[in-house]
Image (tube, rainbow, N blue to C red):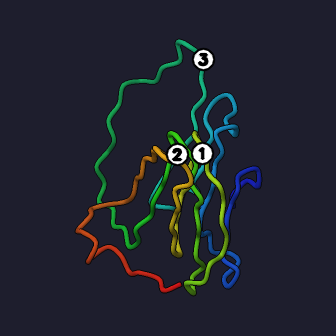
């Protein structure tokens, strides 16, 4: 279960279904905070360390992993974005304003965002592989 200090967004129709998480730039604490639940395909941690902190050099073990869902993450670098999430029935669930340094992860349901300032910059990450729009997206009628 998500620690409630994060902005966890759950389905209205299926209250135990996690739709998204918003993590604000001001939410960092010393050390490591694992943001995504361990069972999600897309993982993210917030790291805040002092000078000199390091880790043992490593590489990741290549296990056979199968994903059955595309999950997505946005990190606002500059500007302001209005993010919108849709419930499992494609109805608008909620909106949040994301500012520079904020991060949002979408696990299920639909999503969209509206750029609110000129020259807004956003990093977008998602699970792959990516086979193009026709194989990746089902559009929601509003």
- x 59%, y 59%: residue: 82
Give the number of the disc on residue 102. 1
* Residue placed under numbered mark 2 in the picture: 76
Looking at the image, tell me whether mark 1 or mark 3 is earlier in sequence order: 3
Question: Foreground: 36 or 38?
Answer: 36
Dot 3, how many residues are within 10 Å of its Cα: few (below 14), some (14-19), or many (20+)?
few
Residue 67 pos. (x, y %): 37, 68
Coordinates of residue 78 in the picture (x, y in percent): 52, 40
User: Which residue is label 3 attached to?
Assistant: 50
Q: CA distance from mark 2 to mark 3?
A: 23 Å
* Label 2: which secondary element: strand
Q: Residues within 10 Å of mark 2 (few under 14, many from 20)?
A: many
Q: Which mark is residue 118?
A: none
Identify which residue is drawn at 68% across, 85% down.
Answer: 13
Closer to the N terminus: mark 2 or mark 3?
3
Q: Give the percent coordinates (x, y) of residue 127.
A: 37, 60
* N-term mark: 1 or 2: 2
Q: Nearer the viewer, mark 1 or mark 3?
A: 1
Q: Quadrant of residue 32?
A: top right
Give the farthest residue toward the right. 4
């Amino acid at each position: 279960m998500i620690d409630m200090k994060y902005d966890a967004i759950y389905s209205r129709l299926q209250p135990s279904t996690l739709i998204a998480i918003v993590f604000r730039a001001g939410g960092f604490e010393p050390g490591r905070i694992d943001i995504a639940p361990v069972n999600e395909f897309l993982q993210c941690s917030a790291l805040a360390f002092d000078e000199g902190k390091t880790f043992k050099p490593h590489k990741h073990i290549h296990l056979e992993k199968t994903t059955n869902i595309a999950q997505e993450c946005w990190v606002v670098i500059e500007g302001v974005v209005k993010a919108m999430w849709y419930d499992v029935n494609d109805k608008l669930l909620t909106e949040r304003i994301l500012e520079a340094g904020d991060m949002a992860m979408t696990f299920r349901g639909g999503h969209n965002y509206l750029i609110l300032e000129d020259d807004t910059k956003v990093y977008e990450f998602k699970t792959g592989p990516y086979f193009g729009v026709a194989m990746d997206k089902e559009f929601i009628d509003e």
